[in-house]
Structure formats: structure tokens, C-alpha cells
Image (tube, rainbow, N blue to C red):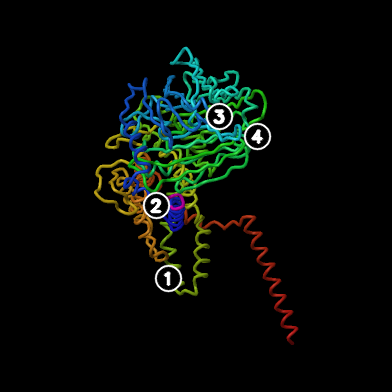
Amino acid sequence: MNKQSIIGLVLIFVVMMGYAYLNSPSVEERKAMEEQSINTLNSNKLQDSTAKINSQNISDSTSIPLSSSLGNGDSSLATSDTASDVNNPFALASRGDTTHYQVSNEVFVVDFQAKGGRIASILLKDYLTYEKKPLYLFDARESDFYLSFFANNRSVSTENLYFECLMPTKTEVKGKDSAVVRMRLYPNTIGGALEGSQPSIDKNKYIEFVYTIRGDQYMLGFDINIVQMQNEIAANTNFIDLTWKANLHQIEKALNMESMNTAVYYKPINDKVDYLKETKDDAKELTTPLKWVSFKQQFFSLTLIANKDFLNADIKNFTEKEAPKGYLKSLQALIGIPYQNVASQSVDMQIYAGPNKYRTMRNYQLDLERQIPLGWSFFLMQWINRIAVIPTFDYLSHWGLSYGLIILILTILLKIFLFPITYKSYLSSAKMRVIQPEVTEINKKFPKQEQAMDKQKATMALYKKAGINPMAGCIPMLLQFPILLAMFRFFPASIELRQQPFLWADDLSSYDSICSLPFNIPFYGDHISLFAILMAVSNLFYTRMTMKQTASTNQMPGMKFMMYAMPIMFLGFLNSYSAALNYYYFLSTIITFLQMWIIRQFIVNDEKVLARIQENKKKPVKKSKFQARLEEMAKKQQAVLSQQQKQKGQKRR
């Protein structure tokens, strides 16, 4: 490894550490994460709901008892001030019972509740939490989802109002079949809520939520129909607020990593997908039309999609400072739904409730897949992942191989593809190594500091005469850098690796641990990852091999220490990352080590390289057109300077 290669490695390390620093949580955020289990956030509600969720079993999905949504009481027959408010057009709808209705398809079970006319829960059939418990992607006990508007000078929300449910004949759908669930909210008849009159509702007028469940889709249809409500809803209303809030709980093994990949994402109509900061509390007021708003977690998303557009949205994600164990993050969105004061109108939407799986999301052609962190900000990273890595990974997955073996095959294929670059890098290193004695002689010839420029010119002249490009060893390293970053993004984001075991690792998407520590080591963690250790040790051996092959020089006295320190730094940085990522880096280093040994033993011979360099010295040095142009410009510049000096001398005389 020559000087330029070492500089390239250091630059790569600096870029990666800087990238990690900018995307890592602050000290305050890490402290907040560590203190999550100290106290409770709304302890009576959250802890009780968590216990109920954990006590559920998939076999119990036909009947899921639910308590109140955030901040709301619940009873089988609600009585409140709303019921006695004679000016409230929905006074009678404030009374009802907590009836639930279920529809299931091939991928999830959706539970509906009459209160709020909303989805009470979504249970994903093919996935479990890291504790092997049922995975509820949506749960009314930890969320709010309701409309707000003005009617008869009253602020009305559907949150505590009871809907009539019109259920389909089929409650289980498969394949291309679908089922439609209709939830209708009726206003009072005129004077219907007045004292002394018979309570009645007007079924010719209603606000209707229509849910369409398709047999084999994670996508639900969600339409809002507003019929004959122009006299109830304020005439000057041009939008209706849709409030969506959720307190999320841990469903993955590594809470910190899951939190760092959870935030509100959104897609403007005429712009790219964007998101709130994932490692900090963040909020935005979005004043431009939006296509969708998503509550995105590490491996799953719940996305509300407009068939046309949403007018605007206020979005927010934050972490409560005092929360129960297992609390992840809180997400909120206040979305503007377009409204016109007409006899009948419909707002057509969809809800995606499923995994962050590239092929699944991309099939909807809504840019949903851009929630998966594949390196979208750097075009080379996302191209490598989308065009090469994901298709190869999917193809190998279809053979039914273990994912540990798939990663091994993928690494071998990548190393075969990169072999020409590895060969060029080694050949450049060999040239620099065999010519090092002559470079040492030049260093001895110009030992003084003020002779540094002369030494540099003599060294470059030697390289040119020998036909050596000093940057030839660094360029191959830089060409491999996008692939290194692409893999850094790909493995932690691949839901296919979620809860997949390999050797001692129980989940390739999260860290592997052979030992849990009773304390937390700064910049390392509270566990020992064996794959991270193997990665670091293999890099130390590789560094030792390359340093031996590089002739010693006094030009960079601290570089040797830096080269040996880098694997140790990576050990601390990657200890809590995906086991698949560390496994890949370990395999990549081992295969590179073998490639370099094969090249040295059977392909590149130092004596032949030196002989070729000596032959190059005998040949006349050819100047490129660019170099000739530079020399011509330098001569003209020198002539101009000489002429100016002569003119100054004549003036002085």
C-alpha cells in the first residue's frame, strides 16, 4: 500500500465518521433514550394498553378488546355535555356502544370500531415483534384518528361520536376479492335533540367513512363521503382537519436503532419525498399540496395517501422524556382535507399498512419505497442498491438458501466484479514498492526542509520516467467507496433479514450479541458483537499485511498508528449495527486478503515489475497535449515576467 492509498483510506474513514456523526443522536437524545424506563408517560393508559397488547395471541384475533384512544374516556353508553347540547347537530351521535367489526385478508386482520368510525387495530399476519408476539401496526389505544370541522357554531370532531356500521357479507377475503366496510355518522333531525321532542336522526344526511379491503394487498381504500351536509357544516368551510396521532412502541430488537429510523415522512405533489429529522425532535408546517403522509418505522409504515392531494399539513415527531419501557416515539399530523359546500362530495384516499419492502412498495408507483434508506441522497449508492444489489439478493432468496449463505454468495459476486480494480490497486502498490529504493535516494539527496520543492520535483520526474501514476493506487479505492456505502445502507434496511438467524446471531437485521454487559461502555454499548470483533480483527490482519508490503518512509510518521487504529474505531462504531453488515465486511476483507495473496503469488512478480520499470526509463518521456500546453503557458508567463522586470529596471535608471 503506497502513500496515496493510505491517504485515500484516511479520507474514506473521515467521510464515514463525519457521516455517522451528523446522523447520530445528540448526547441529550441518547440520555433521553436511556431514561425511557424511569417513569411513565400517561402511565395508567400506556402501561395498561401495553399489557393488553402483549397478552394478545394471534389466535385471539377474532375478538380484540380495546380501550379508549389517547386522552378519551370510553364506556358502552356515553353521556356527556354534547348529548344535551341542543345546538349540536350531532348530539344524538354522542351516544352508542363499543361495537367492533373485523375483516381479514391474506396479509392482515383489520378491526373496526363504531366509536369514531375508525380502524381500531391492524394485525399483520406474517410478522411478529422481536419478543415473538403479535405485531399490531395500528392500535386505537395508542392513537387518534378523526375529522374536525365547525357546525352550528360548534367545533365538532368525530373522535367521540358513534357511527353506524354497514358490514359486508364476507369478513374474510382472498386473492382479487374485496370487502367494503361503511361507517356512517348521521346528524339530528331539526329539533330532534330538543327537550320534549322525540330523539331522531336524519339518515338522508351523513358523513361516511368507506374502507375497502382487498384480498392480497397491504393497501386499503379509504374514502370520505359527505352527503347533504351543506346546512350543517359551516358554509365558509373550505377544508376539514384530519388529526392523526400515534404513540409508537418498540417492535425491533435494538430500540436505539429503531428510534433512529422512525419519523414522519411526506411526499409533496411536485417534489421529492422528504421527512422530519429521525434523530431529533422535529416539526414542520407544510403549506404546499401533498400526495401522502406516512408514519414510518424501521421496517414498517402506515401511510395515508390522497388520490388527488391534501391541501397542507402540520407534522411533528418527538420523544417523551418520561416514558415506560418499550416506548419508541410519538408522531403527529394535522392534515387539511379539501371541502366544498355542495350537496355531495367524496374525498378518495388509500392507506398503506405494511412492510418497508422495496418491491412491495415500488409496485404501487407512489414513491413509497423512498422511505427505505437506500442512499437516495447520493445517486451512486441508490443505483448500486436498486440496479445491482437488490435484484441479485432477491434472485438468490428465491432459491430458499439461508440468508447467511446468500450474503456470502453476494459478497463473492461483488468481489469478482471488483477484481480488476483490486488488481490495478495491487499493481500500483507493487510499482511503488519496487521503486522505493530510488525514492529513498532522492530523500537523502534533499534532506533539508527548504529543499522540499526540489525533492518533490525529482520524485515526480522519477515517477514520470518510470511510467508510474501516483494516483493509480488511490483511484481504485475511491471507486469502491460507493459500494462500501451502499452496503452500509442496504443491510440494516433489508426487512428480508429481519429475525433471520445465522450461526450465533438470532436476527441478522440487528446486532448479534455473545455477551451482555452489566454496564454501558461509551462509543461501544452494553453488549459484545462477535461479527463486529471478527470484522475488526480481519481488518487488523489485512492492515498488517499491506503495511509489510509497503516500504517504510519517514514522510508520514503517524500514518502507521492511524492505519492500525481505524479497525478499532470501526469496532466501536459498528458494534450496535446490523449483524449482516458486520458479517459482510468480515467476508469482504477475507476475500480481499485472498485475492491479494493470489495476485502476489501467481500474477504479479516484483522482479518482473522492476524490469518493466527499467525498460520504461529507457524510453523517451512522451508529453501529453495537455502537459505541452501547460509548459507553453508557463514559458509565456515567464517571458512576460522577464519583460516586466526589464521595464522596471529601465525606469529606475
> Hey, what amino acid is under mark 2?
Asp
Residue 364 vs residue 474, the one in the foreground: 364
Residue occupied by mark 4? 238
Q: Residues within 10 Å of mark 4 (few under 14, many from 20)?
A: few
In whole angstroms, how far apart are the C-alphas of marks 2 and 3? Answer: 97 Å
> Hey, what amino acid is under mark 1?
Lys
> Hey, what amino acid is under mark 3?
Val
Asked whether the beta carbons under mark 4 and mark 1 sit within 8 Å of each other, the answer is no
- Under tag 2, what secondary structure? helix
| Residue 610 in sight here | no
> Hey, what amino acid is under mark 4?
Asn
Magenta residues, as a range? 21-26
Q: Mark 3 or mark 4, which is nearer the start of the sequence?
A: 3
Q: Residues within 10 Å of mark 1 (few under 14, many from 20)?
A: few
* Label number found at residue 444: 1
Residue 585 in picture, x, y percent from top left: 37, 43
Q: Mark 3 or mark 1, which is nearer the start of the sequence?
A: 3
Residue occupying the point 46% across, 31% down: 80
Q: Mark 3 or mark 2, which is nearer the start of the sequence?
A: 3
Residue occupied by mark 3? 86
Quadrant (top left/top right/bottom left/bottom right) for the N terminus: bottom left
Residue 289 vs residue 4, the one in the foreground: 289
Residue occupied by mark 2? 606
Q: Mark 4 or mark 2, which is nearer the start of the sequence?
A: 4
